[in-house]
Image (cartoon, helix red, strand yellow):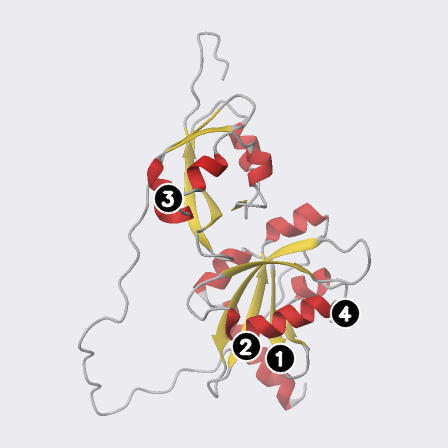
Amino acid sequence: MSEAGQDWARLGATAAQDATLASYAAGGALLLWDRDAGQPGFTNAAARALLAGTGSLPATTRQRLSLLAGGLASPDRLRLERLRLTAGFAAALVTCGCKLVTAADGTPILAIAVPAAEFRRLGIALPQAEADPLPPPEAPAPATTPAEEPAAMATTPARAVRFLWQSDAQARLTSLSPNLAELAGPDAVAQLVGRPWADLIGAVVQDRSGGLLERLSGTTTWSGHEVLWRTATPGEGARVELSGVPVLDAARQV
């Protein structure tokens, strides 16, 4: 492996440990975009399967990735994008989570994660997980002189938003509590109520682990089903844990 290849491999290993990227990918694809070369600098095994073994992306996708790498993506949160990662008329749009990571020299690098659920939707087999080719660089030893304590925290953690929802027997969203507006914007409730969950999944809600529709149609209580819900900020999503309790009639029917 060349020195440049080793640098990309180390950065890929570091990006794979990013909590936001790892949580979104959930065992799926990770690739890093080389903005100067206009092609992927690093791809894990799942990304290579998704790209059909080539790094040849459509021109419109390369242009979009260049914009994301240039600052449209954020280093602090995940930005959702619908991208075509293969060429050809039948190329499907893939939901990707994009985030900037920092190289050793301080250069921002665009990381693109694709969740395992997208592989199932596209009918692409996930390859077995591969060992990292190189470990991430070790953190430098702490300085001998104590660092000054910051005057104040730069940011405060976001407050958790709890909301109630209801569906009918046809898995159609029938009710949402108004406080969902804190997460998804003031028009979210009016726009979402009345729509089938099947339409919401992929457009508003990313079912990363799969199986949400099956749970919605079941007759058992469930909890802790994690999804990514689009927020009021364009292209961004928030992690949401859904729980459900079926309401049954005397015949034990939903």
Measuring from the top left, give residue 218's x and y in whole percent.
52, 25
Marks 4/2: CA–CA distance: 23 Å
Q: Amino acid at mark 3?
A: Ala
Query: What residue is pinned by disc 4?
Result: 54
In front: mark 4 or mark 2?
2
Q: Amino acid at mark 1?
A: Arg
Numbered mark located on residue 181 in the image:
3
Above or below, comparing residue 118 to residue 22 in the picture: above
Upstream in the sequence, badge 3 or badge 4? 4
Q: Amino acid at mark 4?
A: Thr
Measuring from the top left, give residue 22's x and y in whole percent.
50, 61
Left or right, residue 247 beside residue 135: left
CA neighbours of label 2 inside 10 A, class few (<14), some (14 to 19), many (20+): some
Upstream in the sequence, badge 3 or badge 1? 1
Provide the secondary structure element on which disc 4 rests. Answer: loop
Residue at x 28% of width, y 90% of height: 143
Query: What residue is pinned by disc 2?
Result: 70
Left or right, residue 250 beside residue 27: left
Residue at x 49% of width, y 57% of height: 234
Residue at x 49% of width, y 17% of height: 254
Query: What residue is pinned by disc 1?
Result: 35
Measuring from the top left, give residue 83's x and y in whole percent.
65, 60
Question: Quick check: marks 1 and 2 in contact, CB under 8 Å?
Answer: yes
In front: mark 1 or mark 2?
2
Upstream in the sequence, badge 1 or badge 4? 1
Q: Nearer the viewer, residue 251 or 90?
A: 90
